[in-house]
Image (cartoon, rainbow, N blue to C red):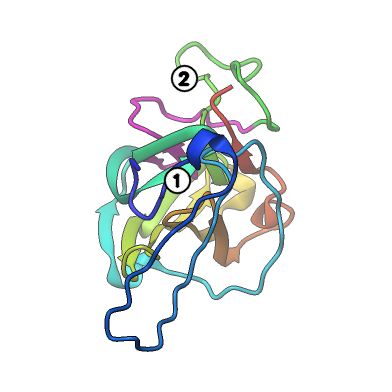
């Protein structure tokens, strides 16, 4: 009802539903159901996992050294109470839900943040992105050969959509040797996303996220 692989609410929201499956040849049948109790999500939990790095730039679509680019997803994705088939990818390590002309401020702040970045110049974008996923929000710039790439993988209803920020550094002179590559992976039919980190070279603590914001926040 509304989105691929989503069956919708139970009658009267009573949390039960009966299904009858036809099996005319009486053969063995395996049916796999993944039940999600809500079409919106009130909060997120964070858990480390030993997942392999996914580099969408290796076999996906290279969008180049974008400032911000609106991209259509191959499937609807729900973040908190926002469901969209469009995201905006932004150079400073931010993925917005939906289409926007905003560019994330150069200076990141702690989440949640619904207003403007303090002491932000009027000549710059000051509004903190929301709703958004922040794999590595920082004052980033492209190095030689750097860019943003996307890649769809798998088959419905279990597809993934990966976004890779490849070969970015920081604008600060102290981080002249920085070279970062990181990825967000969205999972179809769920609210699950992975934050994956590949090459994160450069002076500490910034190469380990010392000046970056990593997280997620809703529209509010």
Q: Which residue is mark 1?
A: 141
Q: Is residue 186 left or right of residue 63?
A: right
Crowd tier of the residue under label 1, counting other residues whose Cα lies within 10 Å: few below 14, some 14–19, many 20 or above: some
Q: Give the mark, 2 or 1, whose residue is nearer the N terminus.
A: 2
Mark 2 = which residue?
Answer: 124
Magenta extent: 87-108
Q: Residue 8: within the magenta?
A: no
**SS of the residue under disc 2:** loop
In-front residue for pair 96/24:
24
Q: Quadrant of residue 70?
A: top left
Image vertical order of residue 219 relative to residue 94, above or below = above
Residue depicted at x 32% and y 62%: 151
What residue is rendered at 46% in x and 70% in y? 54
Q: Are the two marked residues, 2 and 1, in contact with CB atoms closer than 8 angstroms? A: no
Q: What residue lies at 49% left-to-right and 45% top-to-bottom? A: 93
State the residue lying farthest toward the bottom.
Answer: 27
Q: Position of residue 164 (x, y in %)?
A: 42, 58
Query: Magenta stretch mostly in which secondary structure?
Result: loop
Q: Which circle marks residue 129 in the picture?
A: none
Query: Helix, strand, or loop for circle 1?
Result: strand
Residue 60, percent from left and from top: 28, 66
Which percent across, then down, holds residue 211? 68, 43
Q: Which residue occupies the foreground of this view, 60 or 137?
A: 60
């Amino acid at each position: 009802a509304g989105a691929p692989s989503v069956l919708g609410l139970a009658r009267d929201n009573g949390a039960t539903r009966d299904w009858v499956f036809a099996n005319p040849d009486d053969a063995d049948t395996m049916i796999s159901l993944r039940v999600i109790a809500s079409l919106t999500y009130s909060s997120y939990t964070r858990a480390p996992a030993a997942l392999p790095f996914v580099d969408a730039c290796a076999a996906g679509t290279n969008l180049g050294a974008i400032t911000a680019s609106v991209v259509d997803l191959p499937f609807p994705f729900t973040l908190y109470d926002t469901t969209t088939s469009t995201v905006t990818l932004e150079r400073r390590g931010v993925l917005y839900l939906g289409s926007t002309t905003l560019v994330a401020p150069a200076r990141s702040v702690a989440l949640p943040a619904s207003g403007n970045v303090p002491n932000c110049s009027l000549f710059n974008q000051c509004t903190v992105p929301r709703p958004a996923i922040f794999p590595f929000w920082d004052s980033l710039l492209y190095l030689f050969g750097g860019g943003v790439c996307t890649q769809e993988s798998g088959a419905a209803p279990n597809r993934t959509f990966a976004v890779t920020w490849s070969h970015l550094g920081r604008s600060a002179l102290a981080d002249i040797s920085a070279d970062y590559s990181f990825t967000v992976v969205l999972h179809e039919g769920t609210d699950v996303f992975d934050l994956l980190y590949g090459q994160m070279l450069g002076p500490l603590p910034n190469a380990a996220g010392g000046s970056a914001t990593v997280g997620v926040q809703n529209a509010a």
